[in-house]
Amino acid sequence: MSECVREYFLLNDQLLPAGLFGSLFKPPANYVYEVFRATCGAALFLEDHLERFFRTVTLAGTDTGITDSMLKSGIYKVIGNNAPDDGNLKISLYTDHSGQQLFIYYTPHVYPTAEEFRDGVSTELFFAERNNPNAKVMDTRLREEADLMKREHVVYEVLLVDRDGFITEGSRSNIFFIKDGFLITPPSGMVLEGITRKQIIQLAAENDIPLKEEKVHYQNLNYFDGLFISGTSRRVLPVRRVNELEFRVTDPLISKLQRLFEQKVIDYLQKP
């Protein structure tokens, strides 16, 4: 499957046909990137995504010269010159022999089905960890190993477990656990702080839902009433199974957060 879909992509400040992407996109094994969702002609929660992009650039020690307004202009040029359907856009940044290469393009996505939102998804534990969890830097090796495990075990997602046995996040998602009406999520320093994760934490604060950040050991999973993963494509997605351990997906807190998040999306899109 091609990394770039739809009709046009942006390379630096030039709009190009998607057919040229494969010959031009030659990233190293590790590179800075950001993924966000476009819907109804708008980039969802774009301010948060750009803030994280520039934070990653700083953590990577890269001096780009790229400004917030330059990125916004490029993003909306790509949105405006492609089909208006919902999709995921990706910013990829790296340096090669020709200099700095900034790509903005639609990337393949698979959104959960209505049945998966209702019935939950299966996951497996994956004993691996990111080198720098706070920076959104593509780790090609880890991504390939995670995707292989998902195919071999026929699961929707794998949950990363660090060397001390603590669950940190999914390969492409963050994770929340539920116990007696409390939300528990791994501490920020252990994970890539997803934008959907940030929105859920804000929703919890705004709606008097108790939440705490603390480590969760994989051997203590049976202590929890339920769990869900979150992300750009996944939003609030219940988990029904981790390895052989089954969870209830009808916890009222999950359905409440699903409703609150969908309303937050609507409110964002209606902003002037």
Image: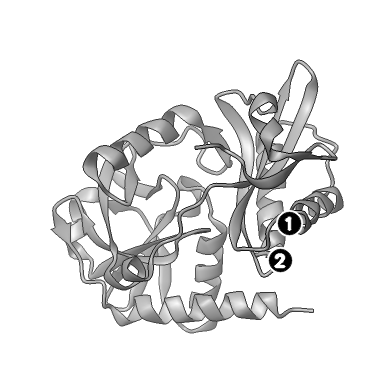
x and y, in percent, of residue 260 in the image: 50, 80
Res. 21 in view: yes
Q: Residue at x 58, y 42 (%)?
A: 136
Above or below, 76 against 130 in this view is below
x and y, in percent, of residue 14 in the image: 84, 38
Instruction: Answer with the quarter of the image where residue 186 lies.
Output: bottom left
- Within 10 Å of the Cα at label 2, are there few (<14), some (14-19), or many (20+) other Cα atoms? some
Circle 1: residue type = Ile
Q: Secondary structure at mark 1?
A: helix
Q: Secondary structure at mark 2?
A: strand
Q: CA distance from mark 1 to mark 2?
A: 8 Å
Res. 165 in view: no
Is label 1 in contact with label 2 (beta carbons under 8 Å)? Answer: yes
Instruction: Answer with the quarter of the image where residue 113 lies.
Output: bottom left
Residue receiving disc 1: 79
Above or below, 255 against 21 in this view is below
Q: Is residue 112 left or right of residue 196?
A: left
| Mark sitting on residue 42 | 2
Above or below, 73 against 207 in this view is above
x and y, in percent, of residue 235 in the image: 47, 65
Q: Is residue 3 left or right of residue 51?
A: left
Above or below, 249 against 50 in this view is below
State which tag comes first along the sequence, 1 or 2: 2
Circle 2: residue type = Ala
Q: Residue at x 62, y 63 (%)?
A: 85
Q: Residue furthest top?
A: 97
| Mark sitting on residue 133 | none
Along the line of sight, which residue is nearer the eye, 131 or 255?
Answer: 255
Query: Which-is-in-front pick, marks 1 and 2?
Result: 1
x and y, in percent, of residue 82 in the image: 71, 54
Q: Residue at x 59, y 54 (%)?
A: 88
